[in-house]
Amino acid sequence: MAAKADPKTVDDRAINTAVATFLKTDRMSRSERLSAFLSYVTVETLSGRGEDIRAKTIAQDVYGRDPSSKDYSENVVRVDARRLRRLLEEYYSGEGSGAEICIRMPTGSYAPKFEYHKTSASATNETTDGSDARRKDIVKFGSAGAALAALLGLGIYAIQGAPKVTSPLPTLSEAERVALINLSGASLQAENLCRQGRNLLFPIADTAQQNLATGLFYRAVELDPDYACGYAGAAHSRATQAILTDNDVARTALYTEARDMATKAQAISPKDGWVVSGLAWVAVAGGDLAKALELSQLSAELSPTDGNVLDFHGVISILAGEYQEARYATDPARKRDTKGLQHAQHNIYGVASYHAGAYSDATVAFETAIRLGEPVSALTLIYLAVSHQANGYFIEAQRFVGELEDGFPNFPVSTVLGRMYPDEKAPKAIVEHLLAAGWTGQQTQQSGTSDG
């Protein structure tokens, strides 16, 4: 039986280490959503706000859900809480049986408890409840606690002037840790924030998530104006928003901002694949697909194993009609350096396979993405439905259309597809397959993309 930890004697670092260790397990490292869930509730608890955690706040802060769709969103949170509770129990009864600190997720609560896994002299009082005000330092910029939490994988910050970001920070290799320790505190923080921002760039059609990413990238630029990653990241996120918006004035402003950030990144590090990828994505937003594809191919040559670069190269190749190139860039069997980031290669490979007529490959890719916990959005369900429909599996297609209409009732399918594809043939074929699978087409009358 786990002994209870004394909040006055248990160092926050021990808790951070316990959480970071669990996040690195095989099951958790493949699930961005559950990792974000645990990271969020941990920091909220250590900051003294554990009692205020609700399904609604998790749905909004972690998943970026629209509060108006609370019934669906809160149900997703409850399901994930049960999954996380089960994974914790399985871990501490097996692989983590020798751990010093045990993390529990009590039934009926979203606030985790931290207990000594083995009885010790210091483990005699109540379970940690996060009431100690000193723990609030963990979410302050510039504090040692925040830097430590970032290095351990708890990349959650309260960004001044930006929404709270709750995606887990990708883990660093030992060599990267040593190199970063030699940087200034500001440079280290900029690196951490840029990594987390890159982790938020997919799903592409989620504009709320793009806003979160932009906030991180701008904060990275503020902390280290000579660091190209922040500028390049902002170029990606702002260009995405320019592509998605149907407001001409907003599109021009977003495109101009994205172009300026890409230019600044290029001035700092012109041979960096991530920087060139930003230039390519800005070219997409500007309507120059030929230039975008040329730059994207260059970015993949400069950084042939960078997962983010390959993902964007895959998307750009799809938009340019180069479906086999997109399949090559995002082939799940291709070697890529994930850097601990959550990539979207299975989803992108699935889209490319659908357009290439390899419908079975497409359905396998999307279902693998869901199984591995990769970013899932309305677009994932759309392509799953049309891939099954095109492959003749009509019952499966109808099921995913139902999930699309239940989970993302306000997603403007035709609007988003029309903004993404310059060639109207591609979105037209997708909509035709959707209609054949039983889609009512009502979503085309809605506006906004916040549910994607």
Image (cartoon, helix red, strand yellow):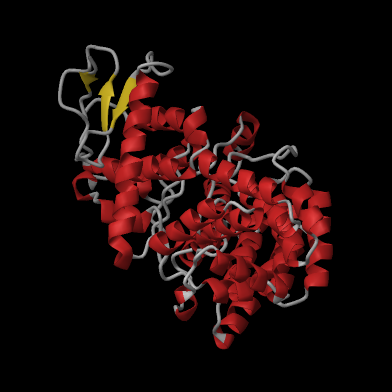
Q: Position of residue 352 (x, y in %)?
A: 71, 56
Residue positioned 74% across, 56% down in the render: 357
Is residue 42 in view? no
Quick check: 125 left or right of 431? left
Residue positioned 48% across, 43% down in the render: 32
Q: Nearer the viewer, residue 149 or 360?
A: 360
Quick check: 289 left or right of 113? right
Using the image, determine if residue 23 lies above or below residue 368: above
Q: Please identify the quadrant where the N terminus is shown.
A: top left
Q: Position of residue 239 (x, y in %)?
A: 63, 70
Q: Position of residue 112 (x, y in %)?
A: 27, 36
For this orientation, the residue located farthest to the bottom is 249
Using the image, determine if residue 214 lies above or below residue 16: below
Is residue 368 in view? yes
For this orientation, the residue located farthest to the left is 125
Q: How many marks?
A: 0
Q: Position of residue 228 (x, y in %)?
A: 67, 57
Using the image, determine if residue 233 lies above or below residue 131: below
Residue 364 occupies which quadrant of the picture?
top right
Q: Nearer the viewer, residue 329 or 134?
A: 329
Quick check: 187 left or right of 72? right
Q: Nearer the viewer, residue 134 or 207?
A: 207
Residue positioned 42% across, 55% down in the render: 165
Quick check: 62 left or right of 259? left
Residue 278 occupies which quadrant of the picture?
bottom right
